[in-house]
Each structure stands twice: as C-alpha cells, then as structure tokens.
Amino acid sequence: MQQPIPLQKGDLIALSAPARKISPEELQIAIHKIEEAGFRLKIDERLFAAENQFAGNDSIRTALLQDLLDDKEVKAVLFVRGGYGSLRIIDRLDFSGFVQSPKWLVGYSDITVIHARVQQLGIQSLHASMPINFESNTEESLQSLFDALQNQAKPISFDAHPLNKTGDVKAEVVGGNLSTLFSLLGSDLFPETIGKILFLEDLDEYLYHIDRMMMALKRAGKLTHLAGLIIGGMTAMNDNSVPFGKTAEEIIAEHVSEFDYPVCFGFPAGHIRDNRAICFGRSLSLKIEKTVRLL
C-alpha cells in the first residue's frame, strides 16, 4: 500500500472530529504536546460544533473533514476522539483528491471506519492515540505516534502472554476496534483479512458480546485465512450477574484455537494508556516467542 509522505518539523497537522463532540478545554494539553513536538496546528472553528453527542450534525462533520482531506498544506489529520459517528459520514466523503495526494490519517476506536476506507483505497494510515487521550498517555505512546508520522517507527517489544501462539510472520496489518468492525461486517468496508495480520481491541463490552462478535467474524470466514492475529487492550469488560465464565482473551483464544497462525495477546495498543502507534496497511514483521516483537 502507498505510504503518505513522512512529516518534517514545521509541517501542518489538522484536527478533525468525525464522531463525538469536544471542547477547546479538552484539547489544551494535546495542542501543547503537538507544538512541542515541532509541528504547526490547524484548528477550524467547526471542530467545536455540537449537536447532542456529536461534533455538529453530519453535514458539518463531513464538510470539515472534506476540507482537510483536500487541503494540500495539511500533511496529517489527527482525529480528536472516537465515540460514534464516523460511520454516519463515511459515504459522504470524496477521497479522490486524497488519493492523488495522500496524507496521514490518525486515530483509533470509532476511527476504524476511516482506516477501513483508506486501506480500501490502497493507502496506509496510523492506528494511534488521539488528542483527547494525550494527557493520560504514556510518553512511549506519544513518541511512537510522532515517530511514525516521520517514518521513524521503532520496534514494539513486550513480554509474552500465556495464551499466545508462537510464530514468525510478515504481512500487512489491518483491523481496529472489534465492535466497529462488527458493524461493518457484510459491507464493502470490511477489510480484506486473507493473508493479513488482524489487529483487534475493544472497550466496555459485555463478555457475551465479545463471544457473539467473534462467532460472527468466524462464521463469515474472516478469521480462517489470517497470517496472524494481534489482540490489544480488552479494557473494562462487563459481565452479567450470571458470569460468562471466560475473560475476553480466553474467548478469543477459544475461537481461533483451530487455526495454526501465530496469535499474541496484551499488545500495547487500544483503549489503554500505553497506546502505541501501528501502521495499518504496511507489511510488518510479527515475532511471537518468549517476547513479542512487531516492526
């Protein structure tokens, strides 16, 4: 897939809110950290529009992102937060100009919808932290974002999880938030998974629904021919008064136990403080032994 041009110090980064609303106060720390890293910022007044839970109505959110996609001076777009809303506007966006002059699009969670569209167009994007989280993110997490924007990504290494399946593979990475991917199942936006490393993470889901979503992906053949599977944060999971009886990781391990590709759990990405940047659409090496390494 095509890689957007790496950023240099002084390049212009724009902020967009395709989903939940945000206030200027919630962005102050992120603004400081982005400028401290050596980049200029473009903040349009439409960023702070509000309509109920959304950052303005669908037309406002679409228009702002469309302008940023088409603005040749903007070298990267950071989505300020997730929530819900990207799916409502994705089919309104015209990516023809973006394809001619790709730029980094950065975010996670609900932004999985936008990653899916960008990968469909053959362009890499960054699954990484968003400004709403910058205050609580680890320094390693933020540095990984700024490194990736400049094409200086470092290897990500961490200790193995007991449920891991060892192996060594190199393939393109696709995926994102499990619940959001589940909402794309059966549509043209669901990413191709054959021969790919699939990354999954999620937040605040009931354990039985993790099982339901994994069953749906499995029955649709999306887990059968993977090159590998990476499971990030499965954060703040919920259970019913009658326990489901397994953790989210155990549920996922059960559903992929029949396949022979390598699987790792506990990857530092997702709705966690140490949310490391992963370049979606790029061929990366995943090595799972006593430690896990991705580069």
Image (spheres, grey):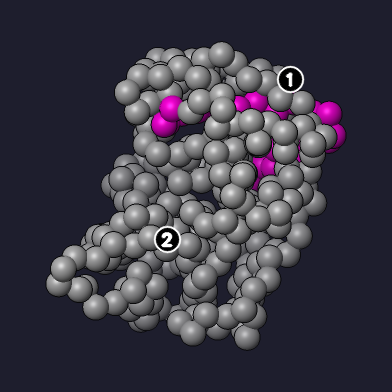
- Seen in the picture, residue 205 relative to 241 is either above or below; the reply is above
In percent of width and height, residue 251 lies at 32, 73
Residue 235: which numbered mark, if any?
A: 2
Quadrant assignment, res 4: top right
Measuring 38% from the left and 26% from the top, which residue is drawn there? 54
The amino acid pointed to by label 2 is Thr
Crowding at dot 1, Cα within 10 Å, few <14 / some 14-19 / many 20+, comes out as some
In percent of width and height, residue 266 lies at 52, 70
Q: Secondary structure at mark 1?
A: loop
In percent of width and height, residue 125 lies at 60, 43
The amino acid pointed to by label 1 is Glu
Asked whether the residues under the numbered discs 1 and 2 touch, taking CB atoms below 8 Å apart as contact, a structural biologist would say: no
Magenta segment includes 2: yes
Residue 198 visible in image: no
Q: CA distance from mark 1 to mark 2?
A: 37 Å
In percent of width and height, residue 275 lies at 59, 55
* Range of residues picked out in magenta: 1-21
The secondary structure that dominates the magenta segment is loop
In this figure, which residue is indicated by the disc labeled 1?
73
Q: Secondary structure at mark 2?
A: strand
Q: Earlier in the sequence, mark 1 or mark 2?
A: 1
Measuring 66% from the left and 18% from the top, which residue is drawn there? 71
Q: Report the quarter where the C terminus lies.
A: bottom right
Residue 26 visible in image: yes
Q: How many marks?
A: 2
Measuring 43% from the left and 23% from the top, which residue is drawn there? 55
Question: Residue lying farthest right?
Answer: 9
